[in-house]
Amino acid sequence: MKNKFKIPALILCSLFAFGCNKPNTPEPEIPDDHKEDDKKDMISYKDIYNFVHLKSNVKSGLVTYRASDGYIGNEVQGYNHFYYLAKEEGNYFQMTFENKKFNFKESYIENDLLKSTDKIFATRCFLSPVTGKAKISTSAFLKEGTFSLLKIYVNDDVIFEKEVGSAGIYVEKVVDLNENDNVYFEISGDSLVSINPEIDFTLRKELELHNACDGYYGDVHPFYDFESKKMHMYYLSTGNQKGEKYDRFRSMLDVSSDFLHYSPVEINMDDSARPEQDLYFVLNVFKDKEGKYRSSMGMGNHTTTSVSEDLVTWKNGLIPYIDPEDDLFKYQYAAYYDTDVISGRDPDMIYDKGTDSYYTVTMNYLTSAGAKGTKYLTLYIGNGQGKFSTTGYKLVNFTGRGDPECPQIKHIGNRWYIFYSVVGTGTKGNVGKFAYRMGDENTLPQNVNWEEKEERYLDGEDLHAAQLNEVGDKFYAYGWLNYQYNTSVWGGYLNIPHEVFVDSDGTLSSRLDEELLRLLNKGQLEKFNKEFTNNVDSVLKLDRNMITFDVEVLNNEDAGIVIEHNSDKFFIGVENRVNKKYVVIKNLADDYKVSNELRLASDNKYSFTVLLDNDFIDVDVNHNRVLSSYGCLTNLIKNLSIKANDNKLSNLTVYKLASSQNVYF
């Protein structure tokens, strides 16, 4: 290298919730224009993962510096110690800012994009303001061109060199930097490359993508507000807050505008008209006929509601009236249970525009509550004014089974669906296995024989008390994953977004959506251009990664990968049982034999995407099955092994997984 670039100093539900009532009017018929679902507000994945990049304050000292700290909202060289250069014939030249980018002849730097030619190499430079040990890391993706090479220098020394492809690359190096050392990120080749390097003097731990509030989430009740484009994650307090303590089961709220980062928002009750329930006063939220925000919750013998103008302050949602048929004093938006019901819990209320009706599905006990008591999942119906009948429709008998907690009713396409999570179907006895039943086409929910409908599942045993929420014209499922491994606890971490969609036959599937997977991929680390048919130990070392591979099942043996850390060995792959195939996540070394599984379609070829997010494992199979798990892998180095068992495992590729800190950079 001919010269070092010298720069002068410059610039700167669970609980007791219950049924509903039905008006003494004929059952509403489904109008022709409602044979298909109402037109939903269209929304794109870009709208969902909507992270706003703001101009960074001036940074100094032993902190984390990211290239975007220099270019977002800036038009000058040197802001936060980043410079924009072009290397021609071994010499560096400063670019000049014009037309919203830094330019030098045919090369330019525009935000994260570096445009080079065969003779002029666009180069981003960091001038170290301090002396200390630093982690230099970056992803790089080829956007245009056929060849590009990334070289990273510390002054004159090359510390990394690799070709950049469209699949991306990731690099991470820990080095000692002195004040005024130059770190160059040089792109050569006629190409356009996206790169946003980071120089971290704090050597901080990468934070997982699975969000935990201050004290862990109890049962979650997501509501996406289309007007503000924000996800409101209402949840029940576990009482384990690290900061200010809140009562167990109190309603709490975290809000997100990008689906991956959440901030707490204090919600409260309007003292002039306090809700009937003063603990969990907001749970399942929906919009009523007038467009007001409402929430349903249980009061032992009936379902009550609260109402809000802003999703933050809630007041009593009941409206008194005199029923002209029996001259009795009653309430709108209150659903009282059948005379044979002694109690109920976990009501979910919705308004359906097509039938101009309110529906509430709830768990009703007909005898003393308990595992052996008589209990039903029951439907109550109200008219367009929210006036309910006390006569309910018994949908499914759960006598002898665990309680169907956190039930929901949804109208999707031209069918109705009911959802619930049965106690005792989760690992270590927790409520788990997000279950649903599918109604008949163009049939009102009260006319479906739900008892005879197959119980199907959208996740495995580790995702507890999941809920389905409309996000514009899309649906996403959220629940909680244990905060302790292999232990019966209540509360934990929020899963990353799982999109739920309808197949052609009306069944539901789930996936990690395409935009989420794009964001989580921080670049390729290793690709194995071979086919594995035998078992192989210690193929590669892992930390936080995304792993993709294909499995072709040729026999009745398991096929997949094994992730090992110390004595824990997690198998992730296909398990074949009497011609039924399952995606499984199980600890091969666990005395309790904890296993998490989901039935697969009866194919022979499966494409896997596996996310290792510290203690969490998410598996997407064929983009129509998602399985979530909480393990005990931490963020330490792990071994990747192959368990092929004479099946075929191919296209094994390992990527760096984004962290909470860098997923949008």
Image (tube, rainbow, N blue to C red):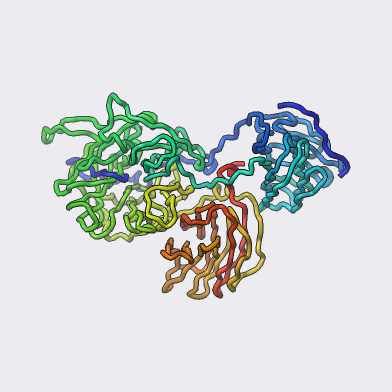
Report the residue at 73% width, 26% height from top: 11
Q: Quadrant of the N terminus?
A: top right
Instruction: Decide: is 143 above or below 527.
Output: above
Q: Quadrant of the C terminus?
A: top right
Q: Residue 17 in the image: x percent, y percent? A: 26, 43
Q: Residue 98 occupies which quadrant of the picture?
A: top right
Could you tell me how many numbered marks the image carries? 0
Q: Nearer the viewer, residue 3 or 528?
A: 3
The residue furthest top is 272
User: Does the rendering let one see residue 572?
Assistant: no
Report the residue at 52% width, 46% height from top: 209
Instruction: Decide: is 579 above or below 225.
Output: below
Q: Relative to residue 111, is residue 271 drawn left or right?
A: left
Q: Relative to residue 397, is residue 553 drawn left or right?
A: right
Q: Relative to residue 34, is residue 58 drawn left or right?
A: right
Q: Nearer the viewer, residue 193 or 438?
A: 193
User: Does the rendering let one see residue 573?
Assistant: yes
Report the residue at 73% width, 44% height from top: 176
Report the residue at 65% width, 64% height from top: 528
The residue furthest left is 326
Q: Residue 461 in the image: x percent, y percent? A: 40, 58
Q: Residue 379 in the image: x percent, y percent? A: 25, 48
Q: Relative to residue 430, is residue 369 drawn left or right?
A: left
Q: Residue 245 in the image: x percent, y percent? A: 38, 36
Q: Nearer the viewer, residue 316 or 567?
A: 567
Instruction: Decide: is 191 above or below 225.
Output: below
